[in-house]
Amino acid sequence: MLFSTPFSKGYWRTAVSELKDLRKLIFAALMIAACMILSRFKIPLSDGLTLNITFLARALCAAVCGPVVSIVFGAAEDTLSFFLGNSGGPYFPGYMITTVTGCIIYALFFYRARITVWRIIFAKLITNVQNVLLGSLWSAMLYSKGYIYYMTTSAWKNALYFPVQVLLLVWVLQSLLPVMHRMRWSPCQLEGDRIPWH
């Protein structure tokens, strides 16, 4: 069942019910493992700034499991990735807040919604903006340079990486939406073999 907006009781009742669906919880656990694997493939840029593709697993989990499971997923994924990943830096819960917020944004755009290219663009744009604003705050608190420095550096990184992220999201969702439909996790959403623009 699709909802035209996440601002309805039915949407949130359905989202809460996902906490009782064992298959969805197992899928969320698999996406945590995927994030941990994908986090190995990253390009460090500076203090607290890297390029990676973990957002793909986060967006996919949000699309399948919804915003309520995404809160649990984001908190668990960020914490486990830190403690099992041996990143070398200090653990800071602010980054968990950024991860959880990003997962909720993906869920509000993708879960039980008609996924379009424009929805993907807006979801990625908003998550990138919150990454810049919150991530820069956490970096300024942890490292020696000021907020403006980290915000400027992060904004450039996110702006340059944004088109690639959108293309990767379109490709991944376009590839997996038929599988999600066969598993009865999503209605058929492709027009032909492509995600529609609107």
Image (cartoon, rainbow, N blue to C red):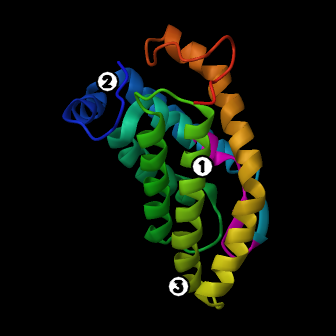
Q: Nearer the viewer, residue 96 or 117?
A: 117
Left or right of 112 in this view: 173 = right
Q: Is residue 91 above or below residue 143?
A: above
Left or right of 18 in this view: 61 = right
For disc 3, the marked residue is: 141
Q: Is residue 36 visible?
A: no
Q: Which amino acid does label 2 sit on?
A: Asp
Real-space Cα distance between discs 1 and 2? 27 Å
What secondary structure is marked by label 1? helix
For disc 2, the marked residue is: 21
Q: Is residue 172 above or below residue 56?
A: above
Residue under the image location 25 percent in, 36 percent down: 12
Q: Which of 191 and 131 is in front in this view?
A: 191
Real-space Cα distance between discs 1 and 3? 25 Å
Q: Can residue 146 be seen in this view?
A: yes
Left or right of 11 in this view: 55 = right
Q: Nearer the viewer, mark 1 or mark 3?
A: 1
Left or right of 134 in this view: 124 = right
Residue under the image location 43 percent in, 63 percent down: 97
Q: In this view, does 36 lie above or below 192?
A: below
Q: Residue 174's quadrant in the figure?
A: top right
Residue under the image location 59 percent in, 39 percent down: 118
For disc 1, the marked residue is: 124
Q: Which of 4 and 180 is in front in this view?
A: 4
**Position of residue 23 measured from the top left corner of the image (x, y, whole percent):** 40, 21
Q: Give the range drawn in magenta.
A: 46-57
How many residues crowd around disc 2 within 10 Å: few (fewer than 14), some, or many (20 or more)? Answer: few
